[in-house]
Image (cartoon, grey):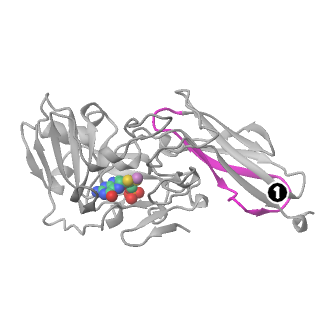
Amino acid sequence: MPIQHTADPPNVEAALSDLGAGTTPTELFYTRCNFPIPRLDLGTWKLETSGAFGRPRAWTMDELRGLPRVEQTITLECAGNGRTLMTPVPPGTPWGLGAVGTARFGGVRLADVLAASGLQSGAVELIFSGADHGSVEPEGEISYEFNLDVGTARADGPMLAWTMGGEPLTPEHGYPLRLVVPGHYGMRSVKWLTRITAVEQPFVAHFPRKYRYRGERGVIDGTAVGPIRVRSLITWPEDGAHLAIGPLTLRGIAWSGSNSIEHVEVEVDGSWLPARLGRPPDGTGPVPWSVEWAPSAAGRHALAVRAADAGGHEQPEASVWNEGGYGNNVVQRIVVEVDPEALQ
Ligand SMILES: Nc1nc2c(c(=O)[nH]1)N[C@H]1C(S)=C(S)[C@@H](COP(=O)(O)O)O[C@H]1N2
Ligand SMILES: [Mo]
């Protein structure tokens, strides 16, 4: 069952037990909305390309459908996932570890739309504007806007998607069109997209200013939040679960925004064991892992999981604090109880 933090606008995380191997069903996929959901009508909706484009224009959905179609399995994770494991807990939505999900997105390559609009060589960044808006401090009324550097934007990964799990996007996930940037934390994957502006100077605005690792390891202004840090989760059993004694299989997933997963280890009662890695869904989703375990005694058992990626990144043993509570990929620890009455 998903865990709802706010109802209107919806901010909802997944139960870890719903994040098994494979893609996440849309109704269980986490939702992160800063402002009320805009209700957009395909009859009047258009995607404007403006600024440093040789052929700026307003695209209809039918015109976008005329470009080569792509589908990709992509993991979206909120930069605030794991925030409540920091001490003190930074302000913001109190995410546990379920603000992550994997879906098959369908649409077109961002690079194809940029090329067809004649992106000019002087452009350094693209600004993506959503139709949602609201009041923030200190700016007042703003739209949701986020930037992406031209190099990343023209690469193969980023896409403009109108389907998720083979169905049109739902209102909460960005109907009718959203940006999806694989490998980056979710804030860049702008929903309810209505405009792409190419700019020749770096973009400074509320959300890009907010998403920085401010105060991390003593660096006052920090660096911009970008690639998803390596993380692994135990998806079965749940924290606090009561288990029957006997052989069982611990299961979970591991992913990283910048590299493939190199190994996953699971700590059982104080010893680290290598996990068996499975095949990621469609080759690009999270890596499923499993470990066989036969609890030898009733009572409480501590379990933990940690992953390392091929770039040499590992998960920290202790949360690395920053003001926004972003990118906390601390090792996950749970406790399970083997019930004496379940002893055979
Ligand atoms: N227009 C718009 N796009 C947005 C947001 C938003 O509030 N407005 N939230 C962002 C954040 S912080 C995240 S984590 C992802 C979440 O996408 P989802 O709700 O489809 O899971 O959307 C991003 N795109
Ligand atoms: Mo997010």
Q: Is residue 50 above or below residue 175?
A: above
Q: Residue at (50%, 35%) from the top-left corner?
A: 217
Residue 70 visible in the displayed image: no
Q: Is residue 229 above or below residue 237?
A: above
Which percent across, then down, holds residue 110? 25, 42
Q: Residue at (48%, 38%) from the top-left corner?
A: 216
Q: Magenta residues, as a range?
A: 232-260
Which percent across, then down, holds residue 70? 31, 45
Which percent across, then down, holds residue 273? 75, 38
**Pointer 1 residue:** 300
Question: Which quarter of the rendered picture does the C terminus lie within?
Answer: bottom right
Which percent across, then down, holds residue 101? 48, 54
Q: Is residue 104 above or below residue 221?
A: below
**From the viewer's perspective, is 248 left or right of 201?**
right
Query: Depth check: 83 or 186 in front?
Result: 83
Query: Depth check: 67 or 200 in front?
Result: 200
